Image (spheres, coloured by chain):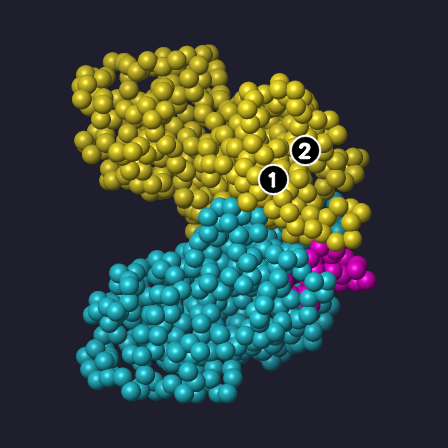
Chain colours: A cyan, B yellow
């Protein structure tokens, strides 16, 4: 077992039992405060541990790294150091935060220098995203979409059970939780209209996804097997793949989604490491037909992560509208990365690979408004008395996620995004 | 007129009349030699002018820039300075190279320090590509593909004349001319096969394209009009969008091309500025129906650039197999950039926007083997007696391009790529 995952560990920092960030988690992020420029931190309870300040004070001197990697506006340089270093740093942070360690806890001046309240910090985009792929790997989601838009009897396309279908997305417009998104404008055409018109989308939607971030590069021409994938994956974030359904319908044939997706994607700020999620590996759905050899794997490559979507109207309270789980994924992330690299496409540090909408079998687990309201035919009733077919201006969409087992909760925090009117 | 475009200018450097790089061109690139680390250079005749060395010697002191921007492994920092600086540097370089200027020409030691033979330098990827979009803007190409794969009577899809159709491509695998590409492996399925198989593509193809590079960013939520686009475009390169046709057929429904494209795209190393191409603006094809207002423009936004594709077998000579022209584009690059940003998607410095295959009306102007051989039904005869339906291992594909008017030739050099066997 990875040392820092030991469920018996406790920190000298008081941590609420429902916190997403116990000592067993230790996710990495980039934060700033009025008197600290952007830098690497680790979430612990209500606090952020400032790794830049710790590095400056030689707390990582036994690890082979230049501590200035923690004084950067993105995690890219740190994660480029590779899994042995990520793990050594996580273990060292775990040690420093343990209730039997006094290196920090015994020095009140040091505590003030290296601990920052999350409520007093601003979280930034954790990585500079080099390349972004969006997969389409939930069989329930693909079946729902195929049923609505094509033929209910042949909802899954012939290639779906052979290929982890995906497409390249726009990296520039990936933003961190808390960044508002303007309702996009674009071309749409009603089925009975003669010509398209240009204006704000009428069918703004979210997509509940989880994305993994790569931390190791390959050369052009090289491939990765599913069993090797863990070495390349630094960690995971929650991912809201904003979508304009009416724009998508009109533009996507034959080259796929483009402007219906590229106006913004929102992610949670804390990158939960694959190491922290190790105890939550589970078996995925049976894959029938058997995948081709380059997609075969041994062991468990799915992860049990509870996911929830909440919708908060402008002056209303949160409404839970979806509960799903990352373990439902038909194609797991190891297969996704193997597929991405199977043609020799090179993987870079800081790439983001999103799962595609994660829907479960029950209606309450569908990961988009499109599915939850079945194209708007079954609106959702909100606690303030209003109803929604899709997302309104002023609405805030919140996604949360956590793994839990025997009282140890490894949480993601949240990604929340408010929708502003079209510019 | 832009001063550096004056057709009467001559350089003190002897330049062959057929050179792509007369004093009116002055394209920017990144080069290295055994004793010079990567840096910015400008092509002039057979030489490269080393801007890093010139900057170190204060030759740009009248321009508001830090000369260390020329001592970088990509053009991004330089082009981020904006159009007034690009133009000032190009004008200054033009001045230094004019036959009536002795600042360099009068100093033989200086000449040795700042001029490098192209044959003795290695050209690198000119920009770090942040985001890459591939459009589909040639009406002849879209019609040919629609005729072959769908319905000849309705070859153009209903959205094509309304939307500059495009998709996001993979930025990591864009490589510079001279970088060999391995034949990719992937899933394919014959129409009569029960299941797909995995192996090297049997239908490897090139696509003749031109790509523009942006040099000015927008914020998320902002849009650019076609008439504003020139301020955002630094310059153009030749672009070979390698494609695996059999992989593409099996994977592309419903989310578009993915692994059939992402194994590599090849570009020419010299970025020809929009300023240098200014005299070659021409009117584009009539657009009917009239585009929506956000795609309207005034003036000429197409460019008259002659394009040629040559195929050189392993131990044979070059065979010219296609002659096309960038002016055939139905959707021009100003409309492409306006469309890309119309939903608020943010533009970054170093983004690459490729045209899509540039085919003309005649068979000899089709910009891919798919079209030239009409899916392999009309193989091309090569001078060594062999024939090609698609691209073989060992083949080198070369693309060249130039604009010419009254004896002034603004050339792109070439992008050449040799295909290696699958790994």
Q: Is residue A154 magenta?
A: yes
Decide: few, some or many residues near mark 2? Use Cα within 10 Å; few <14, some 14-19, many ≥20.
many
Quick check: do tags 1 and 2 share a chain? yes
The picture places residue B357, in percent across and down from the top left corner, at 60, 34
For marks 1 and 2, the one nearer the N-term is 1
The picture places residue A235, in percent across and down from the top left corner, at 46, 66
User: In front: A42, or A275?
Assistant: A275
**Residue shown at 74% from the left, 39% from the top:** B149
Q: In the picture provided, is A293 more to the left or to the right than B282?
A: right
Residue A64, can we see it? Answer: yes
Q: In the picture provided, is B70 more to the left or to the right than B387?
A: left
List the residue tagged with mark 1.
Answer: B243
**Residue shown at 46% from the left, 52% from the top:** A218
Query: Looking at the image, is A274 positioned above or below residue A232?
Result: below
List the residue tagged with mark 2.
Answer: B370
Callout 2: residue from which chain? B
Element type at marker 1?
strand
Residue A253, can we see it? Answer: no
**Residue shown at 38% from the left, 58% from the top:** A80
Callout 1: residue from which chain? B
Which segment did they paint magenta? Answer: A137-162
User: In front: B17, or A183?
Assistant: B17
Q: Are marks 1 and 2 in contact (CB under 8 Å)?
A: yes
The picture places residue B383, in percent across and down from the top left corner, at 62, 18
Q: Is residue A312 magenta?
A: no
Distance from disc 1 to disc 2, alpha carbons, whole Å, reads 10 Å
The picture places residue B327, in percent across and down from the top left corner, at 57, 26
User: In front: B392, or A325?
Assistant: B392
């Amino acid at each position: 077992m990875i040392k820092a995952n030991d469920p018996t560990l406790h920190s000298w920092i008081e941590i609420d039992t429902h916190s997403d960030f116990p000592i067993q988690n230790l996710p990495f992020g980039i934060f700033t405060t009025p008197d600290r420029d952007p830098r690497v931190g680790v979430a612990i309870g209500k606090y952020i541990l400032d790794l830049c300040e710790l590095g400056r004070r030689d707390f990582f001197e036994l690890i082979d790294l230049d501590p200035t990697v923690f004084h950067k506006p993105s995690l890219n340089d740190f994660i480029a150091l590779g899994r042995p270093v990520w793990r050594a740093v996580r273990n060292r942070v775990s040690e420093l935060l343990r209730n039997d360690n006094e290196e920090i806890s015994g020095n009140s001046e040091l505590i003030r220098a290296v601990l920052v309240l999350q409520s007093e910090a601003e979280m930034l985009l954790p990585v500079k995203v080099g390349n972004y792929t969006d997969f389409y790997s939930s069989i329930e989601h693909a079946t729902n979409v195929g049923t609505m838009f094509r033929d209910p009897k042949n909802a899954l396309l012939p290639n779906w059970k052979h290929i982890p279908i995906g497409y390249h997305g726009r990296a520039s417009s990936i933003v961190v939780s808390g960044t508002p998104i303007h309702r996009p404008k674009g071309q749409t055409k009603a089925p009975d209209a003669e010509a398209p018109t240009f204006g704000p989308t009428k069918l703004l939607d979210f997509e509940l996804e989880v994305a993994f971030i790569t931390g190791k590069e390959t050369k052009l021409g090289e491939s990765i097997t599913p069993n090797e994938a863990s070495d390349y994956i630094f960690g995971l974030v929650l991912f809201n793949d904003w979508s304009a359904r009416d724009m998508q319908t009109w533009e996507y044939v034959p080259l796929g989604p483009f402007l219906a997706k590229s106006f913004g994607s929102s992610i949670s700020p804390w990158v939960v490491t694959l190491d922290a999620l190790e105890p939550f590996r589970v078996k995925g759905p049976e894959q029938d037909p058997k995948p081709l050899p380059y997609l075969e794997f041994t062991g468990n490559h799915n992860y049990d992560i509870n996911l929830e979507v909440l919708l908060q109207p402008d002056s209303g309270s949160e409404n839970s509208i979806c509960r799903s789980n990352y373990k439902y994924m038909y194609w797991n992330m190891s297969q996704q990365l193997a597929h991405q690299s199977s043609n020799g496409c090179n993987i870079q540090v800081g790439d983001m690979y999103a799962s595609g909408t994660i829907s479960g079998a029950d209606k309450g687990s569908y990961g988009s408004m499109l599915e939850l309201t079945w194209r708007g035919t079954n609106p959702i009733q909100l606690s303030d008395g209003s109803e929604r077919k899709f997302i309104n201006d002023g609405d805030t969409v919140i996604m949360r996620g956590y793994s839990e087992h025997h009282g140890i909760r490894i949480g993601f925090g949240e990604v929340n995004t408010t929708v502003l009117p079209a510019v």
